[in-house]
Amino acid sequence: MEFFEAVEARRSIRKFTSDPVPAEVVERALDAAILAPNSSNTQTWNFYWVRSAEKKAELVKACFGQAAARTAQELVVFVADPALWKRSQQPLVEFVEKVNAPKAVIFYYKKLIPMTYRAGFLNLWGYFRALTLWFSGLLRPVPRGPNTLRDLQEVAIKSSALAAENFVLAMAAQGFSTCMMEGFDEVRVKKLLKLSGTARVTMVVGMGKGTEAGTWGPRFRIPREWVIHHV
Ligand SMILES: Cc1cc2nc3c(=O)[nH]c(=O)nc-3n(C[C@H](O)[C@H](O)[C@H](O)COP(=O)(O)O)c2cc1C
């Protein structure tokens, strides 16, 4: 399916048929998720394809039993965790050295990433950094964040949300429907997946073959001129 066809075909579908989704379809969409742009290429994400019937039932419960989860043939949870910068730092340093990236890029991965992805105890390191940058910012443009653990989580959430979008478009391109969900009890989902304290659950995605009853009606968007501004 051509790109714009997939973009237009994708709708949030909340009721799926009992037809199974072939594993290779989900795997291909997960591969597309991995290719999403992400902050500094740190790939601070994990994707949990919940396949065990027992865990699936628990996840549906944590999603308040909503139809998009209850009738989904498969469920994938998109997770963001800023602490995962440590997982990719060494491979990234090795990679940028191998491809002879500019010195500034190597310095960025070796030195700046560890400084940036750190908030410190009670965010104290982050507040100190924010204060010094505030003074520098009086004279020139400076990065204003991320400073706190929340800020770092926000950065990671942006990237994993982009991965989720790649995922749903890849499912649409393969003829399957999806529904992104933020309607879930994050504490319960984190417990179910045994996630670390710094992790955030970005999205649960339900998928399957869609039904007509799966949408409330035709797609609705507010007028484009309310949203798109030529400055
Ligand atoms: C971040 C996010 C969270 C969402 N959470 C839910 C949800 O919990 N339950 C649900 O039925 N739909 C959920 N949706 C789907 C939206 O309601 C849907 O995208 C929107 O109504 C636009 O419709 P469309 O996707 O068919 O274009 C969510 C979508 C996004 C992007």
Image (cartoon, grey):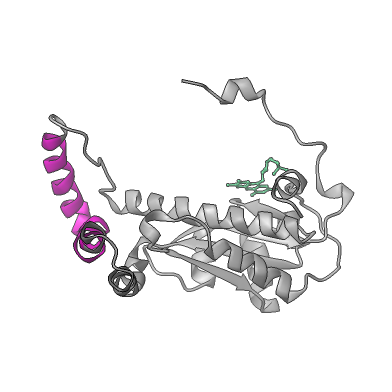
Magenta highlight on residue 115: yes
Q: Nearer the viewer, residue 186 or 114?
A: 114
Task: Please name the residue shown 80% across and 59% down the image.
Answer: 175
Q: Residue at x 76, y 67 (%)?
A: 73
Image-quadrant location for residue 200:
bottom left
- Split into quadrants, the picture shows ligand 1 in the one at top right
| Chief secondary structure of the magenta portion | helix
Q: Position of residue 174 (x, y in %)?
A: 76, 61
State the image coordinates of residue 111 (x, y, percent, origin top left): 19, 63
Tell me: residue 105, above or below residue 226.
Answer: below
Q: What segment is highlighted magenta in the picture?
A: 107-136
> Is residue 113 in sight in this rendering?
yes
Q: Pick out the residue farthest to the right.
A: 212
Residue drawn at 67 percent across, 54 percent down: 169
Q: Judge whether residue 184 can be spotted in this image.
A: no
> Would residue 138 appear left or right of 213 to someone viewing this image?
left
Q: Residue furthest front?
A: 100
Foreground residue, 44 or 119? 44
